[in-house]
Image (spheres, rainbow, N blue to C red):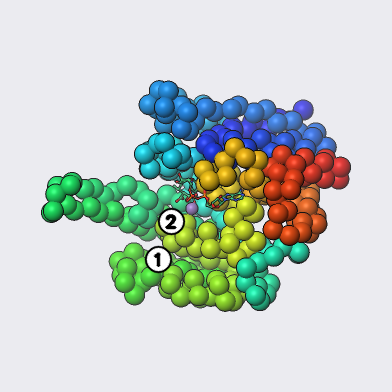
Amino acid sequence: PPVLKLAVIAGDGIGKEVVPQGVRALRAALEPVGVSVATTEFDLGAGRWHRTGETLTDEDMAALAEHDAILLGAVGDPDVPSGVLERGLLLKLRFGFDHYVNLRPTKLLPGVPSPLVDPGDMDFLVVREGTEGPYVGNGGSMRTGTALEVATEVSLNTAVGVERVVRYAFEQAEQRRKKLTLVHKHNVLVHAGHLWRRIVEEVGAEHPEVAVDYAHVDAAMIYLATDPGRFDVIVTDNLFGDIVTDLAAAVGGGIGLAASGNLNPSGAYPSMFEPVHGSAPDIAGKDLADPTATVLSVALLLDHLGHVEPAAAVRAAVESDLAARTGPDAVAARGTTGIGDALVAAIAGR
Ligand code: NAD
Ligand code: IPM
Ligand code: MN
């Protein structure tokens, strides 16, 4: 029987709580179609770093590469210097496995409250570039601690890197409502901004059916908060995409529901699926984290590997669970494991 080889990186904080629910959901989705899931747990994150000083070794990367996909919870811990795990583990994975598409959908599902008074029909897809921008670590500091200290983070934008993610975004727009919005800040960031703008124009010429739009990132925040229904596909750089997608999560029903896929569309490396949220030290260990974002990330994983019916089953289970939730304590009442139990039962019982 076919086997899906899944690498599991639970990571830190609530990552350890939500990932097991994601794995259960994946098994429940695939069992009825005769696919079994073989998991390999990777001990990566704060615990490993404290014990060994390692974040992610070449051996870890080689072992991870042997899998069909990676499911990640979150990394980052208050007792580890900020950036050590975020850069040394998470970004090393995204860069090393060339996850140039960071896919982050927002859909306000029926019955889910939005903080917006008039949310309208909210269903958009952020295609965030995943391997370039200010995230590359091409910066430095000098004269640290002196009055003349200098610190830089340089945003790297290559024509190849921009073009491949823009192409992916146009292909997504073709399958959706045929609208693409470039979000950038080309009135200030003129070098990177004009490269993005030119490439969107060039690739757009190959997609005459897709209406192309542009918003500076600051104005895009206005529209996200006042008229999110205007967006279909948003394509943007790594840092803008990070910020845009936390607001998208908030208006789209909450960070506990926001899913993402770090894709290497060529298939040369395994793609990685993770909730948009972090390790949430403020609620970790209390069974208070909503596992729904992780379960919806599993649906993206299933889509990516071509398991269409199991992906739809996961989404249907989530939709009916969300529709039945009432009041601000809906997550706390059942807890991470209680919600996981309900979702797994609904997926398995389809
Ligand atoms: P966060 O996303 O962890 O938390 C922000 C807020 O959202 C908190 O109030 C938290 O309680 C809440 N929240 C997050 N996930 C939730 C869930 N599933 N259910 C209910 N509430 C939830 O962001 P932060 O506090 O800025 O970062 C904490 C740590 O996580 C930092 O170390 C940061 O670097 C790291 N981080 C990691 C990732 C990742 O691994 N992908 C993503 C973001 C942040
Ligand atoms: C995310 C996170 C990461 C990012 C950090 C932890 C490196 O905020 O996945 O959104 O900035 O991409
Ligand atoms: Mn983020």
Q: Which residue is mark 1?
A: 196
Asked if residue 182 shows in the view, the reply is yes
- Amino acid on which disc 2 is placed: Asn
Residue lying at 52% horizontally and 59% vertically, measured from the top left: 246
Q: CA distance from mark 2 to mark 1?
A: 12 Å
The total of numbered circles placed on residues is 2
Q: Residue at x 47, y 60 (%)?
A: 243
The secondary element bearing badge 2 is classed as helix
Q: Is residue 313 above or below residue 211?
A: above
* Disc 1 crowd, CA 10 A, few/some/many (<14, 14-19, 20+): many
Please state which of the two labelled residues, at mark 2 or mark 1, is closer to the viewer: 2
Quadrant housing residue 341: top right
Mark 2 vs ligand 2: CB under 8 Å? Answer: yes
* Residue type pointed to by label 1: Trp
On residue 238, the disc is: 2
Q: Residue shown at 69%/65% (left/top)?
A: 113
Say which quadrant the C terminus sits in: top right
Q: Nearer the viewer, residue 285 or 31?
A: 285
Task: Give 337 or 109, whichever is nearer the viewer.
Answer: 337
Relative to residue 28, is residue 256 drawn left or right? left
Query: Which one is in front, 28 or 248?
Result: 248
